[in-house]
Amino acid sequence: FFQYCLSGHPTLPCNVLKFKSTTIMLDCGLDMTSTLNFLPLPLVQSPRLSKLPGWVLKDGSTFLDKELKECSGHVFVDSVPEFCLPETELLDLSTVDVILISNYHCMMALPYITEYTGFTGTVYATEPTVQIGRLLMEELVNSIERVPKAQSASMWKNKEVQRLLPAPLKDAVEVSMWRKCYTMPEVNSALSKIQLVGYSQKIELFGAVQVTPLSSGYALGSSNWIIQSHYEKVSYVSGSSLLTTHPQPMDQASLKNSDVLILTGLTQIPTANPDGMVGEFCSNLAMTVRNGGNVLVPCYPSGVIYDLLECLYQYIDSAGLTNVPFYFISPVANSSLEFSQIFAEWLCHNKQTKVYLPEPPFPHAELIQTNKLKHYPSIHGDFSNDFKQPCVVFTGHPSLRFGDVVHFMELWGKSSLNTVIFTEPDFSYLDALAPYQPLAMKCVYCPIDTRLNFIQVSKLLKEVQPLHVVCPEQYTQPPPTQSHRTDLMIDCQPPPMSYRRAEVLTLPYKRRYEKIEIMPELADSLVPLEIKPGISLATVSAVLHTKDNKHVLQLPPKPPQPPASKKRKRVSDDVPECKPLKPLLSGSIPVDQFVQTLEKHGFSDVKVEDTAKGHIVLLQEAETLIQIEEDSTHIICDNDEPLRVKLRDLVLKFLQKF
Amino acid sequence: MPEIKVTPLGAGQDVGRSCILVSIAGKNVMLDCGMHMGYNDDRRFPDFSYITQNGRLTDFLDCVIISHFHLDHCGALPYFSEMVGYDGPIYMTHPTKAICPILLEDYRKITVDKKGETNFFTSQMIKDCMKKVVAVHLHQTVQVDEELEIKAYYAGHVLGAAMFQIKVGCESVVYTGDYNMTPDRHLGAAWIDKCRPDLLITESTYATTIRDSKRCRERDFLKKVHETVERGGKVLIPVFALGRAQELCILLETFWERMNLKAPIYFSTGLTEKANHYYKLFITWTNQKIRKTFVQRNMFEFKHIKAFDRAFADNPGPMVVFATPGMLHAGQSLQIFRKWAGNEKNMVIMPGYCVQGTVGHKILSGQRKLEMEGRQILEVKMQVEYMSFSAHADAKGIMQLIRQAEPRNVLLVHGEAKKMEFLKQKIEQEFHVNCYMPANGETTTILTNPSIPVDISLGLLKRETAIGLLPDVKKPKLMHGTLIMKDNSFRLVSPEQALKELGLAEHQLRFTCRVHIQDPRKEHETVLRVYNHLKGVLKDYSVQHLPDGSITVESILIQATAHSEDQGTKVLLVSWTYQDEELGSYLTSLLKKGLPQSTA
């Protein structure tokens, strides 16, 4: 049992598990923090960005000035943004049998895996995961493709050149592996390989392994996975939440009795309380709008935005924001809002019961109906006609490198009346803002990450008690910026096994049993013998059939009738076939009784001699000698087969067979 | 011998009040709890005294499963749980859980408010009953208790309809409820995997029908509606508020749009909009096409179809009205029918099955003079059309489902005895499985023959698989092990391990046989001849000549010594343990025959 670790990002995992002759990929997260090294892609020509000076080396050489631009002391690559893929060299990815997806954020690298590695297997995910994952991919592709960039920078990636660059470019890892975004045909092809599954559905893989998704409480359709055979259980916990937001609550009970629990996707902001952050979000938003400013919320088109809209729904009137327009701008805004309403079965209890009324589970339906929330595919078209300020705009991408958000940063950045509020925890807000500096706009950081924090993890582990915990190395030490906070790491016994990118881990299992089925006919033929009180034994001689990794024992076929004709056969015809071993024997032979038995069977000249360890029984006439000891019997005789067989059977009467 | 027992309390050789008791591996499950539309007395509900004569329902039943929201499958539920008394779990899918209480309330209103019956379940009872419902997802394995698990499969038929697999250990039953094997305008086709249940309990409404293509029926339907409207007639389509109604609405809506027709289409009850709302919220349960396009165009938002007011029925000119209920046995559809029946320009289209005793059933069987309440005779002059849109599998579909699931036995319910008989024969012929069709109250017992799962030690299994398990029919390999039965656990281990675990020592039984051979040669030459001989004969065995002068065949040892008295005779000592008995015995008899003449 091995685990290949293909991603170093703890919340965007990609691991491959070799489990009982199946190769299972757990998630394929795409690390998009690499895009922070690139210049933003403006929808509309930005004079500011196009005037940024080229970067010049210390020695004055300018050969990189076309590729690298400098902005407020930071250096950016002027090129189509690229992403850091999971490791593809550690093992042959065409051998992956299945991919299990835990939530829509953890499938963004899927097209790279399914379309470029020779992958021929199946992907398993829940319906909301697939639908919303598709929306995220569509938005990503759309926002990059609609701003065609002529230039594709590659010189800076040269190892010799990279060494000379300032941080963080200098320290960027695996830049040679960075790839441009995939295309819609690739997305469609990748998604067509997905098979939909429901929570607690047991899926058989090749008869050897069973996988089951469980609700993880983090997002619509998000799952943890159980990977088990009859005797081993691995729990894969990825992006789970114990907070009550919109998704169905986390199923913790089913994680019990795991041999190994792989723990990924914990909160990225362990010190922030999501509830507090939502409160701050609302009050900052209200304050800005009251002062006549605009609010920009860089966000993903699904997920936390549903919760934010719900909070605002309750907050708008009391905060006097009734007439402030809320805009949600994304090529998939409409789809996201519509899809959120049809997944009642994947929602928390409160939202589920609304559907029984029948009412839409999310109140944003009402916000749309009352025209308080409007959604547009982009800033072009209808939006430009309807656009009124001051307003609140929700749009992507949270990295601030592409999507409509770039336009609003350029538009509103110069005024201190406006505020940008960061709610998504995936990107450092300072890094995200770097290419927009200097900035007059207010910046508020309210990261909302509902995934497990370390206190919850330690509770969870106590509750489900796995034998071993496996986690990314980041979770086994305090965060680098808070090295004194030893409470911000996983604390369990035995200590967790940690992994890092491109490492192979041997997982600790000891397997001793396998399931096998005894066919009814065979079961009927068995003769159980009670050996000790409550314990019975039966010797089984049977034919083993193995098909699709399932083992079945059947009654051995009846021996063929001996041929009627007594034709002379060649000697080799008599060679016994490889028959099963005779059973083992146990017990001991009481000499007196044995001698009596012999006499009863017509041996008249039996003589017994004592030896150091037992007895020797002599049959003088037959020149036969039987050595009897506690744990052995040895019959030494002439080649008189009938005699030997007779003696054998008499001895066997005293012994038990196994 | 383990067995599965099935007793229909309803739907045995009948359509209506579906209710089937199943006992499997010590667990008792009730499948559906419906009412009968054809009766207004005690017979409308299943006879639960079959269970209660021996004790409480809750003690007897491990769970209740409801397949879908039609009243003939869930109509008796509040009576059963609140009036007879059942507190255990009731399982159904989410859409069923959402829609079922509405239809129950509707049913209650008609019975109590309109017909004035007392001693019927109340609104509060419906609510209390629904509190006992646990909603299940498709394909989710629900653990009812440690041993009993159930799993829902998509059944088409109506929104949220499901087939259920009931499983205990390796024994299982699949109950289809009502299902449809062909996708229609709003739902997908039923699907099940090759789950090989011991028993498949299937509906058989259309046991003898093989329906023509859906497209033809749709064209036919549209043609009839269109012609009637063109000549200024009125079309009445009795439907149930949820299900067929939505399919036909989609059909008419698109047709009206395409043909640019102006005649009004009405939908009769207040339930309409609400019903359509359920379809919108549970769109994941509809067919692929609707699901794919719902963001751009939600098929359940109708432009041409408006709410009906009872005053409209007297309006002049053509119109199309969908009215509930679907069998013309009560309510608005019956009222409108009475108004329009006398005019030969009008038409009533019955799009679904009608049970005996209903007005729908009477006019479909050709009756044109109907005795109404108060001895009034209603003469039916309007055209009566029957178009089977009800989403049940036809004979072909039932056979297809059996092929998919590969059951070991089939049991028919929810159909008419005569038709069942025909289908039963067909099933037995084609699939060579037993097919049963018990009447209500009659118990069918099916013997199952489950194999017994045991734990085999990996050591033993690996030892066996290492020998090589090429499937050789002529020479199947036998494996030998010891089954340890302790408490309820069964473990198959190697005999050595069994001895060790029980703290017993092995008793070794060894044989040494003296075989005399006439050979004047020197000892080592004799040994060499013996070696060559054995090597020649025992080609499949490992025969070795050891440096110390002895020979081994597998683990059998052969040593040669000179005879103490006769130099021309050599004595071979052949020694083997009891485990090598066959080979040892064979060797001695082989050697006894002497050595072949030297080829040298």
Image (tube, rainbow, N blue to C red):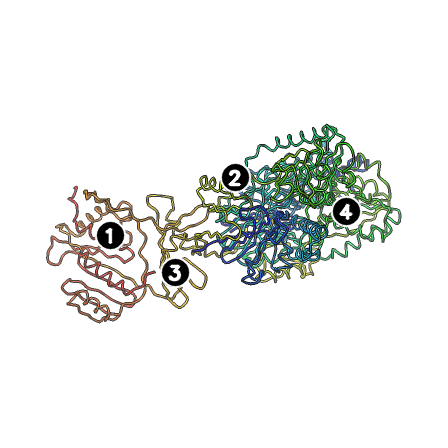
Q: From the image, tell me which residue sits under label 3.
A: B497
Q: Which of marks 1 and 3 is nearer the N terminus?
A: 3
Q: From the image, tell me which residue sits under label 4.
A: A364
Q: In the visual, does B566 lie left or right of A299?
A: left
Mark nearer the viewer, 2 or 1 = 2
User: SS at mark 4?
Assistant: helix
Q: Distance between the residues labelled 3 and 2?
A: 49 Å
B153, A342: nearer the viewer: B153
Q: Where is residue A578 in the image (x, y as percent from the top left)?
A: 30, 49
Mark nearer the viewer, 4 or 2 = 2
Q: From the image, tell me which residue sits under label 2.
A: B400
Q: Distance between the residues labelled 1 and 4?
A: 89 Å
**Disc 1 and disc 4 on one polypeptide chain:** no
Q: From the image, tell me which residue sits under label 1.
A: B551
Q: Earlier in the sequence, mark 2 or mark 1?
A: 2
Q: Position of residue A435 (x, y in %)?
A: 77, 42
Q: Can residue A335 be seen in this view?
A: yes
Type of the residue with mark 4: His
The C terminus of chain B - image quarter: top left
Type of the residue with mark 1: Ile
